[in-house]
Amino acid sequence: MALRFLTAGESHGPGLTAIVEGLPSGLALDPAAVEAELRRRQGGYGRGARMQIEADRATFTAGVRHGKTLGSPLALHIPNLDHKHWEKIMAPFGVAPVPPQREVTAPRPGHADLAGGTKHRARDLRDVLERASARETAARVAVGAVARQFLAVFGVRIVGHTRSLGGITVEARVPEEVPYDAVQPRAAANDLAVLDPEMHARMVAAIDAAKADGDTLGGVVEVLALGVPAGLGSHVHWDRRLDARLGQALLSIPAVKGVEIGPAFANAALRGSQVHDSVAPAAAGGLQRQSNRAGGCEGGVSNGEPLVLRAAMKPLSTLMRALPTVDLRTGKPARAAVERSDVCAVPACGVVAEAVVAIVLAQAWLEKFSGDCLDDVLAAWRHYVQEVARWLPSS
């Protein structure tokens, strides 16, 4: 069975729900690890007041018994603590308050407000923005935390860091200057997930300046998947290519507008002889690549090198110094709607990016090494590792 998931819920509704289908039985789950990822998503310098209101915690309501998955759909729920202030406004039934409360008719440039309102002919753009809100990503982070625990059984780790913010770029490269094993502790040591303390100070100053101007900042996050074997994905069909699936998952994150695998855009300016990763015999037997400019994926298939993915997040579209727009109720020029907003959510975007990468890899893993219980998946994986070692030439 394929691994798939759905989320439901609005930003100011009662809460968020996720259902995950296709997990094998016998997987031990640690709810504290899920809660830790949810806390990471809420952190980061430049976040707004909503992060002080919510204290996200996922409650598992189905699919797990005595700490292990059952093989049936896994269900979890994350309450929205702020819903108590929105019960009448977000009531699923009954008559809307008169006069309207918190009605949104002035769409924010850059948000889903106008495009979604046009699609659904929404009189009140809250019908669109409540689901389009990045609040939904809390459910995906919870699902990703479950996927991480599945992948960890096989030694796969996913780490990430902020590569740039507000035009300030961290020059320290992984793994040339920063070893893979140092990424997670360095990123966890500060509130922007930055590998260079000097760049952290500059980024904090940039966030403070943007806040003073009522503005917002974007940036680029990098996600690394370590321990991924060769053979996940497929070169056969476009929709089974691992790089394409990872790209779709990353682009589905609100405000992410660009993705690259490895240094793709830099590679585009070079000659092929400077880009492609030469192959040589490995000292321990088998083969190894001399570099990883492909970012761990060739021809839609993982190649055994670390997966390196970058996602570009645009500045958030809710500005305290609201941009010009048109009020849909009057047809006259107006200022865009403003409630509350983060100045910068790049570190949070990185946590969501790690989560969706974990989900895609878990899906690809279960396609390659399928099984109804975890022991079956482990057996299929071990058999594959043995057969690949036998197939590869010996040095």
Image (tube, rainbow, N blue to C red):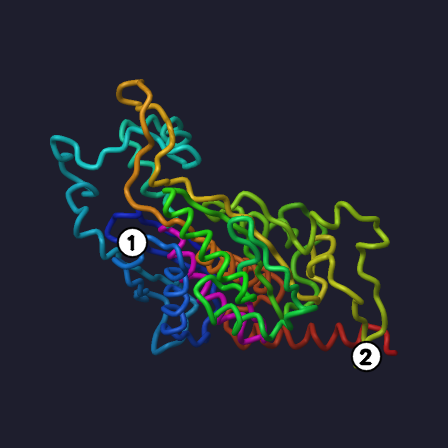
Residue 299 relative to residue 42: left or right: right
Residue 83 relative to residue 235: left or right: left
Dot 2 crowding, Cα within 10 Å, few <14, some 14–19, many 20+: few
Query: SS at mark 1?
Result: helix
Residue 183 relative to residue 10: left or right: right
Q: Amino acid at mark 1?
A: Arg
- Residue 179 image position (x, y, % from top left): 64, 73
Q: Main secondary structure of the magenta part?
A: helix
The residue lying at 65 percent from left, 61 percent from top is 232
- Residue 159 image position (x, y, % from top left): 55, 67
The quadrant holding residue 104 is top left
* Sooner in the amino-acid sequence: mark 1 or mark 2: 1
Q: Nearer the viewer, mark 1 or mark 2?
A: 1
- Residue 110 image position (x, y, % from top left): 44, 35
Q: Amino acid at mark 2?
A: Gly
- Residue position for label 1: 50
Report the magenta residues as a range.
Answer: 135-161
Q: Which mark is residue 285?
A: 2
The residue lying at 33 percent from left, 65 percent from top is 62
Query: SS at mark 2?
Result: loop
The residue lying at 34 percent from left, 46 percent from top is 341
The quadrant holding residue 204 is bottom left
Give the camera-side residue of 337 and 11.
337
